[in-house]
Amino acid sequence: MGVNRVSEILQVQFPIIEGGMAYVGNGELAAAVSNGGGFGQVAISGRTPEGFEEQIKIAISLTDKPFGVNIPISGYFTYNPYFDVVQKYKNHIHAISLASGDPRPYIPYFKGMGLKVMVLVGSVKHAINAEKAGADIVICEGFEAGGRNSPYELTLFGLVPQISKVVTIPVVAAGGIATGRGVIAAMALGAEGVQMGTRFIATTECQAHDHYKNLLVDAKDDSTVVVERSVGRVSRVLKSPYVNKVIELERKNPAPEELYPFISGQRNRLAALEGNVEEGWIHAGQSVGMITSVIPAAEVIQQIVQEMDEYRESLNHALDLFLNPSGEVRI
């Protein structure tokens, strides 16, 4: 019997990764995901280097399981202070995920620290480049995902099978996954693990405001929308009257400096941490319509594993009917 390569690389029970989430990817949540058998991550987005270090210390204090950190390399940060924090705690951090930019200059640097490196990609060519540069895992994020997405806008259903055909390192699927059925579907497409963001926001350990969590529970299948296209970016957020104003402004093709005050990180912080959705916006992926409760992170993982076990029998039956529609006994 083989070993799941994602679980082996990350040293976890289940190949379920917590996505990097601006402001709300905190240390307590990372520890809870890891304690539940998955792989938690502390995000730097929305944090000062000091705040980032504090969340790592919290994670260390709450778990003896492997966890990681997420760093977007899009040019919005002065990275050296954050890299110094990673260097300081490299013996406690198991892996790092790189997103939103060219990871190739950074992969050797972090592997030199002894860390496993995961790279978030939105196209086949970027997956190939990540593998050539030495990445241990490639995370394929579909257009369904919440937050900042690839401008290629490829869906997970098209992305994962194409990437899994051309790389030899493990493929993890991200975007629109929140249930056991979603995990099974991702693995059928060629993934060996999954990454979830939105589902882990609606957990008791996440520092997101309760209003944010409750909005996720109340959301439906069509409750998300993409903003920032007018300035060449793609960001999936939860619909709201405030977001409607942003979209209306974008229809006028505003200059970046005109739009920025409405889509800044401060506006995200207001809504995500303070619950002020009248003056800010919050990230959410298309999986949001499948979230029905705010529960502990470990319970989320338990539910997914249980659902996978339940769906396995019905899936096998459906496959048998598909491959043998006549119902005749095959020899």
Image (spheres, rainbow, N blue to C red):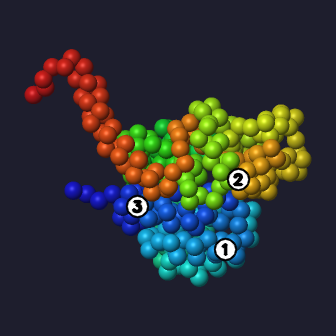
- Is disc 2 placed on a helix, strand or loop? helix
Residue 160 as seen in the image, left or right of residue 123: left
Question: Which class describes the residues within 10 Å of circle 3: few (<14), some (14-19), or many (20+)?
Answer: many
The residue labelled by disc 1 is: 82
- Is disc 1 placed on a helix, strand or loop? helix
**Front residue of 162 and 176:** 176
The residue labelled by disc 3 is: 37
Judge whether residue 226 can be spotted in this image: yes
Residue at 40% over, 56% down: 15
- Is disc 3 placed on a helix, strand or loop? loop
- Is there a contact, CB below 8 Å, between mark 1 and mark 3? no
Question: Which class describes the residues within 10 Å of circle 2: few (<14), some (14-19), or many (20+)?
Answer: many
Can you say which quadrant of the picture contains the C terminus? Answer: top left
Which tag, 3 or 2, sits closer to the chain's start? Answer: 3
Mark 2–mark 1 Cα distance, whole angstroms, equals 22 Å
Residue at 32% over, 40% down: 310
Residue at 43% over, 70% down: 65
Which tag, 1 or 3, sits closer to the chain's start? Answer: 3
Residue 119 as seen in the image, left or right of residue 100: left
Q: Nearer the viewer, mark 1 or mark 3?
A: 3
Can you say which quadrant of the picture contains the N terminus? Answer: bottom left
In x, y percent, where is residue 67? 49, 68
The residue labelled by disc 2 is: 272
Mark 1–mark 3 Cα distance, whole angstroms, equals 27 Å
Mark 3–mark 2 Cα distance, whole angstroms, equals 26 Å
Which tag, 2 or 1, sits closer to the chain's start? Answer: 1
Where is 281 relative to 94, above or below?
above
